[in-house]
Image (spheres, helix red, strand yellow):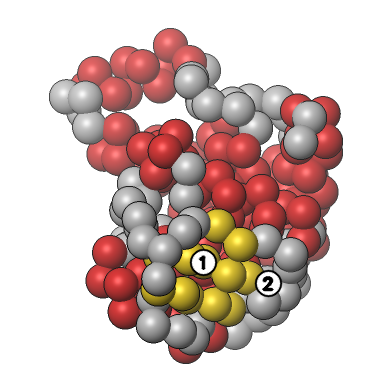
Amino acid sequence: MADDALFALIAAERRRLADELEQLSPADWEQPSLCSGWSTHVVAAHLNLPWSVSSPAFVLGILRARGNIDRAMDHFSRRQAERLDPACCIAGLRAQAEHRFTPPGFGPEAPLTDVVVHGADILRPLGRAVDPDPEALRTVLGFVTSPKGRKGFGAPNLDGVVLQATDVDVTVGAGDEVASGPALALVAAVLGRRAFTDQLAGDGVARLTAAG
């Protein structure tokens, strides 16, 4: 898919998530997300980082974290949540929906994955529906199972396992074991989220959940 089309998907998903976040209660914003240690508020603040933290500042943060990108990201996300209240997090997603930030070495598939996965991280624990665009789901599932996507998002190597989406037309991988279910549940399981596992079926599920 061309970059312009991918950036259009990113913008649509940011706006979709903003619409969902606007429905949350103050208590919802303090609830734990599927990101370990992060509340709804911190995850929403994290999604505002691309247009809020300059590249030099982020590099400095990584250096201060002794090269640990996860630690630097945690620091920036929590600090951003202190700066932005929930309304500002929502406004940022809307105002900057078409922002074309991509992490160094990655294309638009990375920020698309970020908003789709983190949207689920927020909404699933709150019992709310998660309904990304089918094309976004196809793209994200293909990306997180690619070599570059595995490296960038810490996904395991699932050689020998076929991931077969039941709600969109996409199948990735090759092998004798199959894990099937909604594309978002497959993406979540690949990235170590267990909350969607009950939506999956097949002899590849045990391998998938053990590896994720």
Horizontal and vertical percent for residue 65? 21, 28
Horizontal and vertical percent for residue 62? 29, 24
In this view of the protein, can residue 61 be seen by the observer?
A: yes
Image label count: 2
User: What is the three-letter code of the residue carrying label 2?
Assistant: Val
Q: Which quarter of the rendered picture does the C terminus lie within?
A: bottom left
Q: CA distance from mark 1 to mark 2?
A: 20 Å
Left or right? Give the position of 140 relative to 136: left
User: What is the three-letter code of the residue carrying label 1?
Assistant: Leu
Q: Residue at x 22, y 32 (%)?
A: 68
What number is the disc on residue 163? 1
What number is the disc on residue 130? 2
Question: In the picture, residue 70 is in which quadrant?
Answer: top left
Compared with 121, 72 (above or below) is above
Furthest residue toward top: 56
Q: Which quarter of the rendered picture does the N terminus lie within?
A: top right
Horizontal and vertical percent for residue 158? 35, 57
